[in-house]
């Protein structure tokens, strides 16, 4: 009987982070629900016990059911019958197990049927589910779309749809089209308002994850004659009403249990969410930020799976009379994989805590006026969430791909065969740095926090914390890396050439990422000594990467960019 929560002490360490006490008290409104619902916590300790118990259920379902079904789901996958998606048998069993355990709508309020969990333990569940089967996480994790309904829909829509999600109905976000991938301003699916005020949708959507879901959030062009993002609005489409058919399921490299669909909308009835024209500008941006945090969790879960498969194989595989883990070349690979995993996870949960803080304050602001200090704190965490979300999605997905690569490398020729899980891990990992915004787009989102000093300000705050004597040398290394980073930012900002800024953006964001993750691991180590090994390995690894980028930037002249540009 495997349990993917209780066998991973790192998860419990992050759940016990000091910030959780404030997050929980704010989320629970000082435990005001205790008298209304028998399952609502009475105090902080009660809430933490509840999260722990639910995550243990998640871990058990993942270890005993979802992970066991993963291989068959990968081989069989979903299919289309009569314009509808039929899930693989294992996927249907996974969904039913999650429904029965009440693991849908975890972050939704109790009054709407949810568990009222903060984002952090919900993201922890996503991390666990992803380790079991990354493809299934795409179905289960889309319950996060209910957040957009909760934040922006009217009360009637909330009461109509959110309880259905909490009861186990599935969701999707229908954004991309054949001619509008990352460039969502080009979306052309047409929304037409009828004389009675109702809306219908017509057009095609492509690459829609879980596209035959029960409830869809749809980005559509509501304003006649417009061509940019200002003409787009957000809609809810209810599958019960008909009007949308699945034309095909994409034949993908990985995450094969997750149906990626092409949809045809034909006079499909829909409901407007919020205000017209704000579909892309406001609602999709919020939706995508949540999705990017979810992909970061997925990346960490895949990294965990890759590391464990590699470690187990290295212990069991013998060459030249001894286990290959005893060879320094293999041992080093494993140490770096573990360091990248722990660094990814600490960045993921730092980001989720920042998101928790600002989202909870936003929710409280709908109930009462925030105090001056609360407004200040809400603004601070909103900025950090905005900065850390693209950093988390970009860095964790790249490390996920690297760990999947090294997992196969440790398996050698066996890793190239379908007899071992690492082959599926490798295929599943590849998408993480592509969907919900490629790594290159995460750099575009993150670079303004480099140039405006968000990362540097946070790093300087971390550098002022006290650490134990054993870790002073690591802190000194991080301080030196910070100076290299600050010098590089100063040089790039000092050049009045947008092309130069764009060219150097990736290097600057990666430098910030290595330093941020290093400081987070340093902070983790002060509470849990078990992180010390990963901290030492990661900071040494990051030191070399930061030095490489610092040297490149310091010795690069703007006119040399022409060597890297291509023209017809």
Image (spheres, helix red, strand yellow):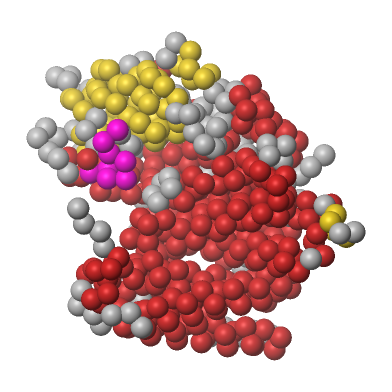
Residue 183 is one of the magenta-drawn residues: yes
Q: Residue at x 27, y 17 (%)?
A: 266
Residue 330 is one of the magenta-drawn residues: no
Horizontal and vertical percent position of residue 146: 44, 38
Camera sees residue 368: no
Q: Which residues are magenta?
A: 178-185
Foreground residue, 268 or 156? 268
Q: Residue at x 52, y 20 (%)?
A: 79
> Is residue 9 rendered to the left or right of residue 138?
right
Foreground residue, 420 or 537? 420
> Is residue 45 rendered to the left or right of residue 494?
right
Q: Quadrant of residue 335?
A: bottom right
Q: Residue at x 34, y 60 (%)?
A: 445
Q: How many marks?
A: 0
Image quarter where the N terminus lies is top right
Horizontal and vertical percent position of residue 489: 35, 79
> Is residue 283 rendered to the left or right of residue 328?
left
Camera sees residue 175: yes
Q: Residue at x 49, y 61 (%)?
A: 395
Residue furthest toward the top?
82
Foreground residue, 495 or 466? 495
Looking at the image, residue 225 lies above or below residue 84: below
Horizontal and vertical percent position of residue 528: 71, 70
Q: Quadrant of residue 247?
A: top left
Looking at the image, residue 263 lies above or below residue 534: above
> Is residue 298 rendered to the left or right of residue 160?
right
Foreground residue, 80 or 547? 547
Residue furthest toward the left?
225
Looking at the image, residue 12 lies above or below residue 415: below
Q: Quadrant of residue 511?
A: bottom left
Horizontal and vertical percent position of residue 476: 58, 88
Q: Magenta stretch mostly in which secondary structure?
A: loop
């Amino acid at each position: 009987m495997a349990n993917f929560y209780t066998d991973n002490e790192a998860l419990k360490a992050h759940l016990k982070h000091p910030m959780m006490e404030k997050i929980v008290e704010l989320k629970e409104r000082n435990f005001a629900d205790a008298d209304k619902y028998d399952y609502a916590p009475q105090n902080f300790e009660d809430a933490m016990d509840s999260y722990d118990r639910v995550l243990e259920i998640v871990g058990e379902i993942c270890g005993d059911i979802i992970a066991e079904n993963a291989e068959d789901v990968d081989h069989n996958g979903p299919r289309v019958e009569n314009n509808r998606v039929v899930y693989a048998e294992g996927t249907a069993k996974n969904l039913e197990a999650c429904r029965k355990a009440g693991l849908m709508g975890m972050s939704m309020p109790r009054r709407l049927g949810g568990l009222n969990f903060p984002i952090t333990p919900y993201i922890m569940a996503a991390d666990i589910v992803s380790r079991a089967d990354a493809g299934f996480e795409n179905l289960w994790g889309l319950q996060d779309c209910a957040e957009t309904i909760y934040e922006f829909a009217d009360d009637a829509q909330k009461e109509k749809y959110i309880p259905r999600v909490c009861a186990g109905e599935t969701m999707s976000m229908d954004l991309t089209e054949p001619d509008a991938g990352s460039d969502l301003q080009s979306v052309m699916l047409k929304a037409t308002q009828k004389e009675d005020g109702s809306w219908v949708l017509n057009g095609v959507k492509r690459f829609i994850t879980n596209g035959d879901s029960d409830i869809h959030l749809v980005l559509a062009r509501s304003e006649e004659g417009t061509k940019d993002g200002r003409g787009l609005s957000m809609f809810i489409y209810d599958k019960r009403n008909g009007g949308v058919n699945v034309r095909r399921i994409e034949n993908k490299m990985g995450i094969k249990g997750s149906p990626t669909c092409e949809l045809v909308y034909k006079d499909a009835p829909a409901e407007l969410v919020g205000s017209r024209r704000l579909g892309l500008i406001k609602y999709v941006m919020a939706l995508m930020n949540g999705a990017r945090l979810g992909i970061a969790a997925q990346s960490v879960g895949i990294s965990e799976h890759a590391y464990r498969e590699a470690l187990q194989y290295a212990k069991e595989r013998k060459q030249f009379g001894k286990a290959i883990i005893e060879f320094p070349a293999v041992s080093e690979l494993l140490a770096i994989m573990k360091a990248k995993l722990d660094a990814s996870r600490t960045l993921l949960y730092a980001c989720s805590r920042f998101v928790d803080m600002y989202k909870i304050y936003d929710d409280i602001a709908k109930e009462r006026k925030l105090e001056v200090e609360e407004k200040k704190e809400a603004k601070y965490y909103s900025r950090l969430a905005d900065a850390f979300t693209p950093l988390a999605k970009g860095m964790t997905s790249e490390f996920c791909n690297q760990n999947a690569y090294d997992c196969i490398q440790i398996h050698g020729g066996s890793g190239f065969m379908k007899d071992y899980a690492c082959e599926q891990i490798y295929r599943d990992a590849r998408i993480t740095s592509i969907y919900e915004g490629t790594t290159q787009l995460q750099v575009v989102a993150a670079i303004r926090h480099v140039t405006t000093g968000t990362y540097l300000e946070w790093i300087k705050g971390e550098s002022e914390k006290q650490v134990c004597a054993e870790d002073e040398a690591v802190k000194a290394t991080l301080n030196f890396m910070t100076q290299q980073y600050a010098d590089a930012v100063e040089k790039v900002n000092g050049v009045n050439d947008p092309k130069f800024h764009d060219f150097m953006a990736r290097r600057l964001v990666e430098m910030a990422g290595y330093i941020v993750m290093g400081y987070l691991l340093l902070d983790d180590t002060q509470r849990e000594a078990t992180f010390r090994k990963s901290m030492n390995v990661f900071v040494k690894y990051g030191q070399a990467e930061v030095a490489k980028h610092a040297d490149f930037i310091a010795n690069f002249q703007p006119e040399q960019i022409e060597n890297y540009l291509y023209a017809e």
